[in-house]
Amino acid sequence: MLTALEVFTTVSVGLMVGVELSVAFVMNRIFAALPEDAGQLARAHGGRMLGALMPFWYISSVVLAGIWAVAGRQHGTGLVLTAAALLVVSVLMSVLLLVPINNRSKTWTPENRPADWKEQSDRWDRYHYARVAVIVAAFALLVTALV
């Protein structure tokens, strides 16, 4: 049963990393290449769509890593606890830095967006890159704990 938990947790976090890497290095570049209004509307739609899904994914990843750390005390506990701590950091980064910008930007249209919308989007991107680095590190620790 523990092995299933370890694998499920690692795969879940790995998929989350893949989605967030895709947002950072694929989707946002596609959106940036679109004409200004289309790019901004695409970001707003992405913010609404992923903003509804990702909180559950992030929280469940923390919970799964925590259960693994408690259940698997004999093997790799330090790695898993560190990964869980990094996942908690990613949740805090999300709530404190990214979600406030996302909550504003997901309602923007070309008619109502603020004058500094690009600067706010760029700030979100920078925070997102940092969060991606944190969850990649957590994923690497979970993978290492498996071996």
Image: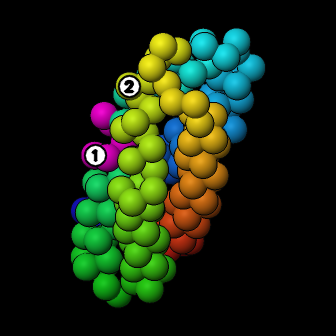
**Label for residue 126?**
none
Quarter of the image for residue 38 reads top right
Is residue 12 among the parts visible in the rendering? no
Give the secondary structure at mark 1: helix
Quarter of the image for residue 26 reads top right
Out of 76 and 81, give the one closest to the viewer: 81
Q: Is residue 114 left or right of residue 119?
A: left
> Which residue sits at x=43%, y=39%?
102
Residue 60 magenta:
no
* Predominant SS along the magenta part: helix
Out of 77 and 105, give the one closest to the viewer: 105
Instruction: Indicate the amino acid at tag 2.
Output: Thr
Separation of marks 1 and 2 at Cα, in angstroms: 21 Å
Is the residue marked by circle 1 packed among few (<14), some (14-19), or many (20+) residues within 10 Å? few
Name the residue tied to disc 1.
56
Horizontal and vertical percent position of residue 111:
48, 13
Residue stretch in magenta: 52-56
Earlier along the polypeptide chain: callout 1 or callout 2? 1
Name the residue tied to disc 2.
107
> Which residue sits at x=62%, y=28%?
27
Horizontal and vertical percent position of residue 96:
39, 60
Q: Looking at the image, is 68 positioned above or below residue 56?
A: below
> Which residue sits at x=31%, y=85%?
73
Horizontal and vertical percent position of residue 109:
47, 17
Out of 140 and 88, give the one closest to the viewer: 88
Instruction: Indicate the amino acid at tag 1.
Output: Phe
